[in-house]
Amino acid sequence: MSEQSTLARTPDRTRRVVIVGAGMAGVQTAVALREQGWHGVITLVGAEPHQPYDRPPLSKAVLLGKADGSAFDVDFQALGIDLELGRYVTGLAAGARVVETDTGPVPYDHLVIATGAEPVPLPGSAGVPGVHLLRTLDDAEGLRPVLARQRSVVVVGAGWIGAEFATAAREAGCPVTVVEAADRPLAGALPAEVASYMTAWYADAGARLRTGVPVASVEDGAVTLVDGTKLPAEAVVVGIGARPATGWLAGSGVELSPEDRSVLADERLRTSVPDVYAVGDCASFPSARYGSRLLVHHWDNALQGPRTVAANIARGEAEGPVYDPVPYFWSEQFGRFVQYAGHHACADETIWRGDPTSAAWSVIWLRGGRLVALLAVGRPRDLAQGRRLIERGAELDRGRAADASVPLKSAAV
């Protein structure tokens, strides 16, 4: 056992951080605590029995059978991190500083809520054979035979996860129909004038896209739309969104958003209950940069936020940092690498870089002439430079910014 692990277990270092959730946010919080010099006990509680793993490969390599899993390369034993896997949290008794689980209470001195998000089920689909979600390792492994046998698939939802699954299914040779209730793909994520250019990607990949027609019902072997169309389906994959997994916090005193049920964390990712923090997909936080509260369901948020939580626990909140990142995510769909940085909802101007019908283009959003968000398709250099410009609050020369041949950093005033 390492010296660091020995220190974590000495009698005078018995203060305990309990982290609920063994996904990216939970694991990174545990690792960051050790990096920040926390020598007390760290207990990581996860509902799944599997060794903690990364989720992005589930819709790619794991789904296609190119990898058996995506376990984190972390030596938990050497770091003195106690893993409590296959253990479900059922409640929080904040007054007693105890997390309730299906196998008994877990006391804490500091608690980190990192339970992530859970997929939204399709109404009326519970118990129907052949209906799948894609969130966990077990979900991905359950879908592998569907792709391996080239079954016909109906994907409900043309968001990020729906597009990524459709991409993998087409790569495997499956007949694919994607059904979206909105009038375009990625309707909840991007403006219509941007998302509309992504519609053609489906047909180019050999997938059929039906928009503006919600699902009426699902049965074994078929999906019926509200217009009466009946789509044959040997498998149905539902990707209509995710919501914070916070139901277990009912009655705990931890304040939740009435709109989205996210934990209402502050600028240091503290909750309304002393010594309780929240991080990752389950938590929203106030952004001074964008002047609004953000709920970010993406990998980078689950990677960055834990450093703030760990620093505030290890150093004390008087010295710890404030969390106000530039949100970032990426998606691989239909042979394209799509990246996004920032938050465009506050923008007052849109500028295109390149032809959106081509293989590589970008669109940027300004507020008062300053860059606040960027979407890059096949232009990773734009994304890298744009992200730094957003962090600086850089003002751009509009003419140079619109010239795709000019490096974006050269458009800064």
Image (cartoon, grey):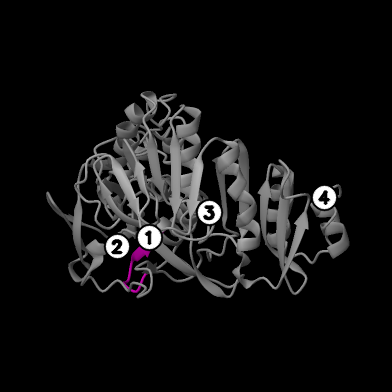
Q: CA distance from mark 3 to mark 2?
A: 28 Å
Question: Hey, what amino acid is under mark 3?
Answer: Pro
Vertical comparison of 62 with 236: above or below:
above
Q: Which residue is mark 4?
A: 404
Q: Earlier in the sequence, mark 1 or mark 3?
A: 3
In front of the other: label 4 or label 2? Answer: 4
Label 2 secondary element: loop
Q: Which residue is mark 2?
A: 246
Q: Residue at x 26, y 42 (%)?
A: 48
Q: Earlier in the sequence, mark 3 or mark 4?
A: 3
Residue 177 visible within the image: yes
Residue 413 visible within the image: no
Q: Magenta stretch?
A: 271-279
Q: Residues within 10 Å of mark 4 (few under 14, many from 20)?
A: some
Give the quadrant of residue 254. Answer: bottom left
Q: Which residue is mark 3?
A: 185
Q: CA distance from mark 4 to mark 1?
A: 37 Å
Label 4 secondary element: loop
Q: Residues within 10 Å of mark 1 (few under 14, many from 20)?
A: many
In front of the other: label 3 or label 2? Answer: 3
Q: Which residue is mark 1?
A: 282
Q: Residue at x 61, y 62 (%)?
A: 192
Side of 405 where 83 appears, left or right: left
Give the quadrant of residue 133. Answer: top left
Q: Cβ–Cβ below 8 Å for labels 1 and 2?
A: yes
How far across and down, in percent of the image, does residue 126 sit?
21, 51
Q: Residues within 10 Å of mark 3 (few under 14, many from 20)?
A: many
How far across and down, in percent of the image, does residue 313 sit?
41, 60
Vertical comparison of 82 with 189: above or below:
above
Q: CA distance from mark 1 to mark 3?
A: 24 Å
In the picture, the quarter occupied by the N terminus is top left
Question: Hey, what amino acid is under mark 2?
Answer: Thr
